[in-house]
Image: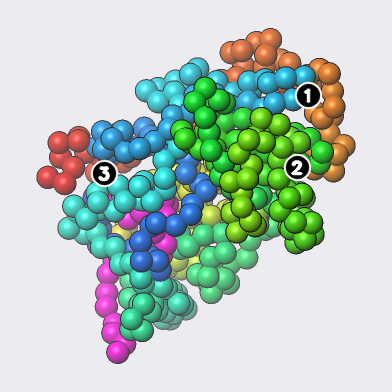
């Protein structure tokens, strides 16, 4: 049976951007419904990074103590292993503020934290197993969404604003006719896990060699591994067999030989189809795109979640007033993009430089990084002047123009849920 309902805002997608935005709007007195197509958050996320600026945001929202009680791993340094030996590239201990680190936490735990905080707000509703299937148009503007539920039901949810937080392949973005500018990327990523033993690499490290790059992320008792391959080469490399893949991993980092058999088959190796794009315009009348729906980021630096959360905070700050009054104009929506365009474009510009000048060369075996007895000049500068390591640390862990919680959304820990 089809039903028609009404709310002020519908957020489509229960990822970090959608959940943060919904929580902030609800704390601002705006009725908001989040539609999440899955039944829970227990999925195999790889983007489990919570950056320093997001940790500060959680403090401002009164959620810092609860986050600190969740299982997580703090990372203070990042580096790479060259033929000349290990080198450190970023030192987060040099950051300003209370969080001189990043945290790796299972994303389902992070999203559950936001869901619990939202459930304490009378203006917040989260609907799991509910998939947005299309947009409702009225007089040339978006007036809501159509949805279906896991039990076969469905209906329409009429709104003043729909916010697309449904990822880099956003169905709502496509339905609204918004087209992204694509930037070419040289790589895709294979994700897999290997056990980590006490006393081994801490933080984040990586190794170039043989037309490949392997990054290791310290997750406590295991490494989250990212193996970079040339764009579009997944099928060809898989056809060589799992043994060939295991040999590549061990050739890059020989001390992983004692555990590589934990990758039992290709089922343990997940492909990330890397994309880098950006919408020239993030909105149409009645619809706003944020996060990956507005700008898909490269995995370089792991900054996608941080950018998405910052979008959400800016959107809440600019839109809560107009939404309370029931008048959200195109100009109001355009302010969100205007605020977030510079940090997005600059971050993507840096990623494109790294793609072109480092990864493209490395993945074709032409990198000046591989096979040298001395590190490149920029790397040597970071070693000679360690204070320079604060620059990449700041760009990754805090980013340009970090956003802070608006006053209406701030809470002390004792007020959360009470």
Q: Residue furthest left?
A: 418
Looking at the rendered structure, the number of numbered marks drawn on it comes to: 3
The quadrant holding residue 258 is top right
What secondary structure is found at the residue carrying circle 3?
helix
Q: Where is residue 287 drawn, in percent x and y? A: 45, 66
Label 2: how many Cα within 10 Å (few below 14, some 14–19, many 20+): some
Label 1: how many Cα within 10 Å (few below 14, some 14–19, many 20+): some
Q: Where is residue 75 drawn, in percent x and y? A: 48, 28
Q: Residue at x 66, y 53 (%)?
A: 274
The reply, left or right, for residue 389 in relation to residue 315 is right
Task: Name the quadrant of the C terminus.
Answer: top left
Is there a contact, CB below 8 Å, between mark 3 and mark 1? no
Q: Nearer the viewer, residue 116 or 336?
A: 116
What residue is shown with label 3? 409
Q: Which mark is residue 349?
A: none
Q: Residue at x 36, y 72 (%)?
A: 130
Q: Residue at x 59, y 23 (%)?
A: 90
Q: How much space separates mark 3 and mark 1, taking CA atoms? A: 49 Å
The quadrant holding residue 370 is top right
What residue is shown with label 2? 248
Q: Where is residue 362 drawn, in percent x and y? A: 80, 38
What secondary structure is found at the residue carrying circle 2?
helix
């Amino acid at each position: 049976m089809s039903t028609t309902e009404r709310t002020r805002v519908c957020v489509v997608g229960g990822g970090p951007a959608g959940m943060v935005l919904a929580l902030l709007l609800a704390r601002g007195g705006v009725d908001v419904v989040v539609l999440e197509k899955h039944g829970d958050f227990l999925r195999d996320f790889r983007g489990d990074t919570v950056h320093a600026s997001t940790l500060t945001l959680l403090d401002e929202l009164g959620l810092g103590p609860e986050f600190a009680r969740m299982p997580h791993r703090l990372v203070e340094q990042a580096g790479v292993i060259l033929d000349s030996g290990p080198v450190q590239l970023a030192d987060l201990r040099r950051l300003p503020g209370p969080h001189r680190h990043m945290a790796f936490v299972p994303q389902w735990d992070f999203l559950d934290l936001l869901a619990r905080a939202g459930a304490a707000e009378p203006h917040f509703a989260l609907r799991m197993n509910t998939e947005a299937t299309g947009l409702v148009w009225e007089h040339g503007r978006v007036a809501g969404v159509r949805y279906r539920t896991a039990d076969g039901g469905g209906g329409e949810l009429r709104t003043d604003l729909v916010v697309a937080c449904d990822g880099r392949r956003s169905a709502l973005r496509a339905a609204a006719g918004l087209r992204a500018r694509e930037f070419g990327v040289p790589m895709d990523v294979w994700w897999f896990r290997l056990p980590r033993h006490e006393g081994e690499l801490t933080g984040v490290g990586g190794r170039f060699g043989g037309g490949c790059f392997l990054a290791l992320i310290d997750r406590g008792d295991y490494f989250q591994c990212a193996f970079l391959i040339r764009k579009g080469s997944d099928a060809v490399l898989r056809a060589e067999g799992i043994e060939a893949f295991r040999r590549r991993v061990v050739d890059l980092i020989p001390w992983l030989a004692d555990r590589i058999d934990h990758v039992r088959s290709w089922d343990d190796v997940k492909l990330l189809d890397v994309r880098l794009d950006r919408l020239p315009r993030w909105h149409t009348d009645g619809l706003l795109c944020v996060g990956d729906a507005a700008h898909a980021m490269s995995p370089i630096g792991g900054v996608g979640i941080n950018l998405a959360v910052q979008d959400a905070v800016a959107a809440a700050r600019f839109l809560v007033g107009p939404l309370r009054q029931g008048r959200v104009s195109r100009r109001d929506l355009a302010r969100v993009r205007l605020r977030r365009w510079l940090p997005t474009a600059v971050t993507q510009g840096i990623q494109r430089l790294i793609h072109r000048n480092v990864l493209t060369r490395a993945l074709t075996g032409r990198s000046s990084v591989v096979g040298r007895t001395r590190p490149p000049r920029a790397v040597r500068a970071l070693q000679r002047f360690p204070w320079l390591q604060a620059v990449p640390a700041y760009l990754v862990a805090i980013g340009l123009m970090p956003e802070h919680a608006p006053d209406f959304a701030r809470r002390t820990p004792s007020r959360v849920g009470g």
